[in-house]
Image: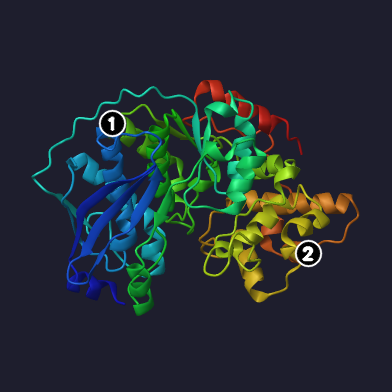
Amino acid sequence: MDYKELIGKYPEFIYHGYDITELDEKIKIVYNFETVGLTEFHPYWVFPRNGIDIGDPVFEEFVFSLGMVELVSYWKAACPPNVHVECGYLSDEQKAWWKKLYYHGLGEFFYTNGVETDIDRFMKIETSGAYKKRSVTAEKKLSGCMIPVGGGKDSIVSLHVLSRYGSVEDNMCFMMNHRNSAFASALIAGYRPEKIYRPKRYLDRTIVELNRQGFLNGHTPLSALIAFAASMSAYICGKKYVVLSNESSANEASVSGSDINHQYSKSFEFEKDFAGYIDKYIPCGVKYFSLLRPLSEIQIAAIFAGLKEYHPVFRSCNAGNAGTKFDTWCLECSKCLFVTMILSPFLTDEEIKDIFRINLLNSKSDTMKKYFEQLIGLHESKPFECVGSVDEINFAMCLAISKRNERGETLPYLLEYYMTTPAYVKYKDSPNIYANYFDEINLIPEDMKKYVRECADECKW
């Protein structure tokens, strides 16, 4: 549907509030949103209670804030320019913070839907005068780490690094909804089921019907949702650190010459913004940072390549966990190809086939070739997936070719094709700037940082 027509027809979106219900050892939180003149939405979450008092002001501030980031998944259907928040207080500074998150977190959504707007015009946030600033003080003693685990190589590398820091017994894994790959990864890392905290998020299916009817649809900042849910879970469980697994390449724009970034809510800019928001507006002692921020994607791949015990269980494919598919490699998307590419310097073609069943670098399909060209920077935009930087990917391709040549092996089809591209000419003699790469601009506690460097230094290639 047409954006301008929609915002004229549906100019108001309301965050009415939320209902918190205690269900034995669980807490159910139902959010109440409305696009005026169109429909209401009632998504909900279920959190294990873990002894939290639902009257705790820190907990309630987290619940309210989780609703603020949840609402954008429903707002996007018609993009109402006026958002009314009826259930909580937001200062002007907070409103500006949320608008920045929405605007940049929806950059891909605006781009793919052809929406021309700016941060001043796309939304105005108003709050009810009935709510004043809530006094938030926390007295809980916090220790250990809450580690979001998604089942991909990045969070597995974080689990590996953290195995050298403190005791697993003082940590917990966070999983939003269940994925076999994530659960299996945590078990391999030594986390018993009772050390895995698993809240569940339930979409209001009304949004699916609106998508079917042609209302606007697209990417939202899911990692921001995970940031609030994981930090809230850390507070519930008494954990001090929320340890993410976002690397330095998450800062790179997806569209050349723009600030449109599929991974905005994984970027260091968002990480700093979020950490500052929690410290100022929900001052509970929880600290949020990414453990892998100093590293490049190719360093992470090198570390992961050596963690053989995880190779049969890890999954990084979003398409392989959608619709009727569950926890598999779809072998048809750009993410499957990217993971194959970034691991290819460190694994043989047989090892790659053991993981994926096939080696996508041997694919001759036009679709896979286009994805390959996007990933090496021959198109205006990279695939809208969580993938490495163009420089890293090209370096990985050159290194993969060099390793196979040294072993006297035949190159897979896409590596042969790569040697005919201008990207190969540009990168084939590039120095290895990644082997000792370590970005000092990060939020990692000093006593933990040395273990990241230690794991990176052990992978020489």
Q: Are marks 2 and 1 in contact (CB under 8 Å)?
A: no
The answer to whether residue 271 is visible is yes
Q: Residues within 10 Å of mark 2 (few under 14, many from 20)?
A: some
**Residue at mark 1:** 280
Query: Residue 227 location, x and y as percent?
Result: 41, 43
Q: Secondary structure at mark 2?
A: helix
Q: Judge left or right: residue 373 versus residue 351.
A: left
Residue found at the very far front of the displayed protein: 24
Binning the other alpha carbons within 10 Å of mark 1 as few (below 14), some (14 to 19) or many (20 upward) gives: few
| Quadrant occupied by the N terminus | bottom left
Residue at left offset 24%, top offset 51%:
18
**In front: label 2 or label 1:** 1
Instruction: Give the residue displayed 44% in from the left and 29% down from the top.
Output: 239
**435 or 211: which is nearer to us?**
211
Residue 311 x %, y % = 72, 49
- Mark 1 secondary-structure assignment: helix
Of the pair 189 and 250, the residue shown nearer to us = 189
Could you tell me which quadrant the C terminus lies in?
A: top right
* Location of residue 33 (image quadrant): bottom left
Q: Amino acid at mark 1?
A: Lys
Q: Nearer the viewer, residue 3 or 160?
A: 160
Q: Residue most toward the right?
A: 408
Rendered location of residue 310, percent (x, y): 70, 45
Residue 416 tag number? 2
Left or right: residue 400 compared with residue 220: right
User: Is residue 431 depicted above or below 424 in this figure?
Assistant: above
Q: Is residue 218 left or right of residue 187?
A: left
